Image: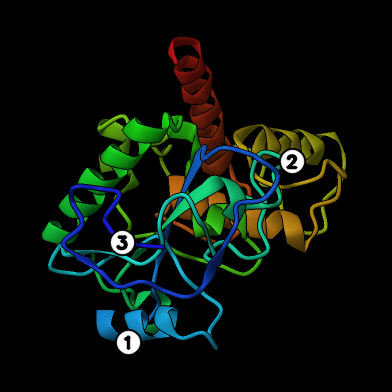
């Protein structure tokens, strides 16, 4: 089904057998960014081309900036897995998936993203969101939609650059070590409810239970990895909560002009 590229930035086609029909009649209104977690682009490509893997994405971006298309955009690629964003649980059916070659947390620390690669990612994202009319706050990372099991594209991914280009939601991180209360696992009460409610308003799949459980910690960690990467511990200190406040304010202003 993949006979020609959907984006002019694609340099080669490598059709994957791992795709299906988009379900529910929903349109494409999300874009999800991943890292491959593989040592090389070719190893990632072989994995996504294998029928046994049952994994794919629409695009793969190599470290040198080469963009490979594996699945036609009209098809449902298998990249998001069990996930949730803004109440939607079948993310695969409404999203485009981009895998970015990077070993990620296989290495400690994770390797940086080369400049050519990031420039290619920005160009591809810009093309996709323009053609499909995807709102910036619907451009997310795998760790945003599956915080309990995923960490990609990781704390070194330059979300700020995409934000400055108007391609995603971004807000400046608050300074570390701000004075104030820290919420942590085992806590409960109205302050925890407010934290959970605000994270859900941003899009994270988190119920307002009032208990700071392990699910809440995983979501806080995912938020920190995306918006406040200087310290990723899953503890809602004053810096984390102030950054969350800034992100929600930015989201509100973007919605007003969208």
Q: Residue at x 66, y 38 (%)?
A: 86
- Relative placement, left or right, of 82 versus 221 is right
Q: Is residue 44 above or below residue 197?
A: below
Residue 3: assigned label: 3
Asked which colour scheme the image uses, the reply is: rainbow
N-terminal of the pair, mark 1 or mark 3, is 3
Badge 1 marks a residue whose secondary structure is: helix
Residue 204, given in percent of the width and then of the height, sits at 65, 45
The answer to which quarter of the image holds residue 20 is bottom right
Q: Quadrant of the N terminus?
A: bottom left
Q: Residue at x 19, y 47 (%)?
A: 8
Q: Nearer the viewer, mark 1 or mark 2?
A: 1
Residue 213, given in percent of the width and then of the height, sits at 80, 58
Residue 174, given in percent of the width and then of the height, sits at 43, 37
Task: Report if residue 220 is visible in the image.
Answer: no
Residue 43: assigned label: 1
User: Label 2 belongs to which residue?
Assistant: 196
- Relative placement, left or right, of 135 versus 64 is right
Task: Report if residue 55 is visible in the image.
Answer: yes
Q: Is residue 238 above or below residue 108?
A: above
* Disc 1 to disc 2, C-alpha distance: 39 Å
N-terminal of the pair, mark 1 or mark 2, is 1
Evaluate if marks 2 and 3 touch, with contact meaning CB atoms under 8 Å apart.
Answer: no
Residue 80: assigned label: none
Q: Is residue 21 above or below residue 253?
A: below
Crowdedness near tag 3: few (<14), some (14–19) or many (≥20) residues, C-alpha within 10 Å: few
The one of 152 and 186 positioned closer to us in this rendering: 152
Badge 3 marks a residue whose secondary structure is: loop
């Amino acid at each position: 089904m993949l006979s020609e590229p959907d984006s002019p930035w694609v340099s080669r086609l490598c059709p994957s057998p791992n795709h299906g029909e988009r379900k529910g009649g929903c349109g494409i209104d999300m874009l999800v960014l991943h890292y491959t977690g593989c040592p090389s682009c070719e190893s990632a490509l072989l994995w996504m081309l294998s029928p046994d893997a049952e994994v794919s994405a629409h695009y793969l971006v190599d470290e040198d900036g080469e963009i490979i298309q594996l699945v036609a955009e009209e098809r449902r690629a298998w990249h998001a897995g069990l996930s949730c964003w803004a109440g939607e649980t079948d993310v695969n059916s409404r999203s485009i998936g981009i895998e970015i070659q990077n070993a990620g947390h296989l290495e400690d620390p994770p390797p940086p993203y080369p400049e050519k690669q990031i420039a290619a990612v920005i160009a591809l994202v810009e093309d996709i969101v323009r053609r499909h009319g995807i709102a910036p706050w619907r451009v997310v990372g795998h760790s945003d939609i599956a915080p309990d099991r995923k960490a990609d594209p990781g704390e070194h991914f330059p979300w700020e650059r995409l934000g400055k280009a108007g391609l995603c939601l971004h807000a400046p991180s608050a300074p570390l070590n701000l004075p104030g209360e820290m919420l942590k696992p085992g806590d409960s009460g109205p302050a925890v409810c407010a934290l959970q409610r605000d994270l859900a308003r941003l899009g994270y799949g988190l119920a307002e239970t009032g208990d700071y459980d392990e699910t809440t910690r995983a979501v806080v960690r995912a938020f920190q990895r995306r918006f406040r990467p200087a310290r990723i511990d899953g503890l809602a200190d004053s810096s984390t909560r102030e950054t969350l406040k800034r992100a929600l304010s930015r989201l509100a202003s973007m919605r007003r002009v969208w």
